[in-house]
Amino acid sequence: MTGTPTVYVTRTIPEIGLDRLRERYEVAVWDGKLPPTKEHIVSMLAELDAAGLVCLLSDEIDAEVLDASPDLSVVSTFSVGYDHVHLAAAAERGIAVGHTPGVLAETTADLAWALLLTCARRTVEGHAHVAADEWETWGPRLLTGPDVHDATLGIVGLGEIGTATAKRAAGFEMDVRYSGRSPKPEREAELAEFGLDATYVDRDELLAESDFVSLHVPLVEETEGLIGSAELQRMSEDAILINTSRGEVVDTDALDTALAAGQIGRAGLDVTDPEPLPADHPLFRHAPERLVVTPHIGSASTGTRNRMAEMVAACTEAGIEGEPLPHSAIRDAGME
Ligand code: DGY
């Protein structure tokens, strides 16, 4: 590589990140509204002889992409999730992979709660009711739903985002259960500081006993389809399922069947499979009475998106300079 290294960015991330990259590198940005195709990414990396790639969760970064530029030393994804990056292929090639943990847990937990409260208290239906000029009088049975306070919240996956979501249950005086591969005493201690006594239970127990089930697992082989028809059948008929993790963690057909059969009460989804979810998808027939969907906006606060942009820039710099990344996906996935 001669001259100033080049970085290719697959979407217009917040300016603060682009500015930081531009201070040190030549930066080319795909400014389309939709993601570039993989072929386009490959051809841009090759043409630019890129040293760095900043990508999004909608870009599949596989061996073909990683081989496109001989100078590529780092891929930084503008996301905490890295299921779209073939980490083993990157590690084999000595290409560092950066991601954005830490900064988006609280913001994503806020969104999980927005969905939880929306599903319980039927605010989307309420708004539609008023907007359609159907609000004729105060109604004793109008849009009733379950209480949130004093209910039981089940967290599947007590990582950073699961813990941030659980923490918020303190204000609602809820019982908190969690499931996962093993108990997490350090997370329990964190929650105890908020007066919460989070109990580790097995997943079946959690599903059977929770009024609200919120999913916070990464997408890996063993979590794909984690919530399928058997799991949905274990939930109570009033229970509300919240997913802000990855769409593929829930079996969409099974959820469609469960909602149609009244096996669970409602679902609030920020992530779907497929994603985007077309408005004519069969699942959508349950909206808004039994289903509320948002377009994968868990981390979409202005402050958090700015911090994510700075983090991908910092990871890209470190990778190009040959320094350890501040946030390495390869390390965080236990592959180092
Ligand atoms: C992530 O970062 O993985 C979220 O899904 C989007 O911010």
Image (cartoon, grey):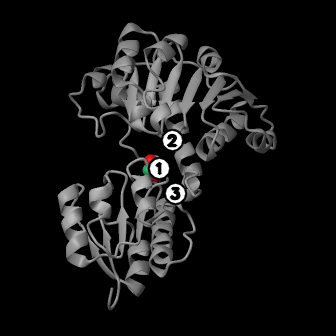
Question: How far from the left and from the top, in percent, is residue 220?
Answer: 47, 39
Element assignment for label 2: loop
Question: Which residue is at a point 44% across and 31% down the rendered structure image?
Answer: 224
Question: Which residue is at a point 51% across and 57% down the rendered structure image?
Answer: 329
The residues bearing labels 2 and 3 have C-alpha atoms spaced at a distance of 14 Å
**Is the C-beta separation of discs 2 and 1 under 8 Å?**
yes
Q: Is mark 3 within 8 Å of ligand 1?
A: no
- Pointer 3 residue: 330
Between 153 and 331, which is closer to the camera in this rendering? 331
- Pointer 1 residue: 81
Question: How far from the left and from the top, in percent, is residue 236?
Answer: 55, 11
Could one spot residue 312 in this view of the protein? yes
Picture quarter containing residue 6? bottom left
Question: Which residue is at a point 50% across and 17% down the rendered structure image?
Answer: 231
- Pointer 2 residue: 218
Pointer 2 or 3: first along the chain: 2
**Which amino acid, mark 2?**
Pro
Pointer 2 or 1: first along the chain: 1
Pointer 3 or 1: first along the chain: 1
Between 24 and 284, which is closer to the camera in this rendering? 24
**Which amino acid, mark 1?**
Gly
Question: How far from the left and from the top, in percent, is residue 71?
Answer: 34, 76
Q: Is mark 2 within 8 Å of ligand 1?
A: no
Q: Is residue 82 shown above or below 142?
A: below
Q: Is mark 1 within 8 Å of ligand 1?
A: yes
